[in-house]
């Protein structure tokens, strides 16, 4: 099996910087908006699997309200994150 993934190395941060980044990332992931989006993702995935849909390798896109490839969902649909972001 050949995979065409680009493997990115870890950021080279000092212990202090890594700890600060971890705290920032955790705070960002646990905002009310992110928590509700995470819950919605879980509901939608369970629903889709129960309906028999094949969603392997796909993420739920909150903007288009459907499952799209991980690559498409991370790319801001070609518009970048600032123009397409809804919140």
Image (cartoon, rainbow, N blue to C red):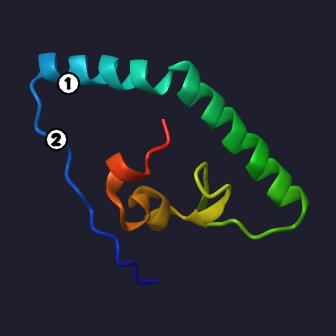
Is 79 situated above or below 82?
A: below
Q: Which mark is residue 11?
A: 2
- Closer to us: 46 or 28: 28
- Crowd band around label 2 with a 10 angstrom C-alpha radius: few (<14), some (14–19), many (20+): few
Tell me residue 57's x, y (percent).
58, 66
* Image point (44%, 66%), residue name: 71
Labels 2 and 1: the sequence-earlier one: 2
Q: Is residue 5 above or below residue 28?
A: below
Residue 59 lies left or right of residue 81; in this view the side is right
Query: Which residue is painted at 40% across and 78% down in the image?
Result: 3
The residue that label 1 is drawn on is 18
Q: Would you say the residues marked 2 and 1 are in contact, meaning their CB atoms lie under 8 Å apart? A: yes
Please tell me which residue is depicted at 47% across the width and 66% down the height of the picture. Answer: 72
Left/right of residue 14 with respect to residue 82 in the rendered view: left
Q: How many marks?
A: 2
Indicate whether 50 appears above or below 5. Answer: above
């Amino acid at each position: 099996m050949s995979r065409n993934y680009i493997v990115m190395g870890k950021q080279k941060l000092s212990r202090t910087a890594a700890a600060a980044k971890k705290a920032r990332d955790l705070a960002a992931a646990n905002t009310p908006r992110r928590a509700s989006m995470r819950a919605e993702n879980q509901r939608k995935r369970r629903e889709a699997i129960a309906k028999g849909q094949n969603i392997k390798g796909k993420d739920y896109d909150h903007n288009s309200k459907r499952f799209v490839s991980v690559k498409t969902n991370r790319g801001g649909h070609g518009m970048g994150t600032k123009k397409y972001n809804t919140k």
